[in-house]
Amino acid sequence: MNSVVCTLFEGHYHLGAAALVNSLWASGFRGRVICGLRGDFPPWSEPSRAEANGIKVRDFGEGFEVWFVPCSTAMHFTNYKPTFMLEMWDGPAAGADRFYYFDPDIVVKCPWEVIERWAENGVAVCEDVNFYLPPRHPLRIGWMHWLKSLGIPLLNAERERYYSGGFIGVPREMKEYLKLWETLIAKIGEVSGSLKTLKQGSANSLFHSMDQDAMNIAFMASNVTINAAGLEAMDFSTGGHMLSHAIGSRKPWKGGFITHALKGYPPSRPVRAFFEHIDRPIQVFSASESKKLLRSLRIASVIGRFHRRA
């Protein structure tokens, strides 16, 4: 087993996960995709076969299969990422040389061979929207004091980029990084009092985006090589051609494109990228719903040519 992919979702995010799976198929990935989920299995999990521990597996042929793994954790899924990856690496992902996590609101735009190279001898990540965080930034200084209080060595004080927690690719030889990330999330939970929320405090809090802050602090406390792409790699700026990440609350599968366009917000690149992956091999929407959403998207795109916020 060479590379394995995973994601985590609950509720309506299964629609995003379906498009992610479709985009992986289109990219040329053939292998195992592990979907950790909370709640009911999505309709597109069928037809499937049963495995141990309540796991379902849908086989799409050509070596491409999706494993649906029920999760009982009470923490917010964003804070569960490294734990889930470690658990799966000892289970359905056992034997993987590289293990990738994608948020369920991401689609892949590039050929899989590009993603494969991305985690070659280094941890694959993308710069976040707010990507520049200098070594002596007040936030980093606070993190340095915190690491010292925990007795965790500061091995890379010169890190200056802030990376998104929406995607990560880890080669087997750097699996220990996931354990450090998991440990730091747990320690942040002790400080914040809970890991059940996506964010806590304000933008000036020492830990605001808990999993993402922990990821970046772990890079300061680790000597792993970082294989980084710029923020354009997630379509956070123009010129991207690798991934597309629909961040924020306005998820593509929710529609409402005309309403948003009339308010000056035309369909974004991630919205358009999502709708390129709604048909195969999973039919994300019914035929009538697809037609309605695509029509709305086209009208909103026309409005956006003439009306948008500065």
Image (tube, helix red, strand yellow):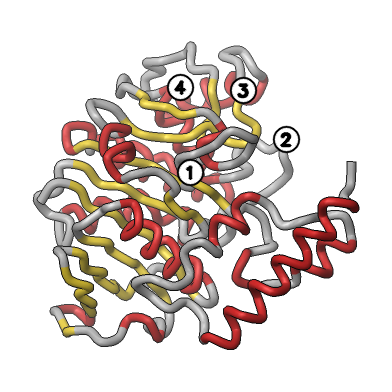
Between residue 230 and residue 125, name the one nearer to us. 230
Q: CA distance from mark 3 to mark 2?
A: 15 Å
Estimate the x, y position of residue 66 in percent, counting from the top left: 26, 69
- Residue 62, by quadrant, is bottom left
Q: Residues within 10 Å of mark 1 (few under 14, many from 20)?
A: many
Query: Residue 71, labelled with which disc?
Result: none
- Tell me if 305 is positioned left or right of 10 in this view: right
Which residue, given by chain and number where applicable, does mark 2 sit on? Answer: 204
- Tell me if 193 is positioned left or right of 69 in this view: right
Amino acid type, callout 2? Asn
Name the secondary structure under disc 2: loop
Q: Residue at x 41, y 15 (%)?
A: 156
Q: Vertical placement of 190 versus 152: above or below?
A: below
Q: Residue at x 41, y 63 (%)?
A: 8
Which residue, given by chain and number where applicable, does mark 3 sit on? Answer: 132
Name the secondary structure under disc 1: loop
Amino acid type, callout 4? Lys
Q: Residues within 10 Å of mark 4 (few under 14, many from 20)?
A: few
Q: CA distance from mark 3 to mark 1?
A: 15 Å
Name the secondary structure under disc 3: strand
> Cβ–Cβ below 8 Å for labels 3 and 2?
no
Q: Is residue 138 visible?
A: yes
Tell which tag, 4 or 2, sits nearer the viewer: 2
Marked residue nearer the N-terminal end (1 or 4): 4
Marked residue nearer the N-terminal end (4 or 2): 4
Query: Residue 148, labelled with which disc?
Result: 4
Marked residue nearer the N-terminal end (3 or 1): 3
Which residue, given by chain and number where applicable, does mark 1 sit on? Answer: 165
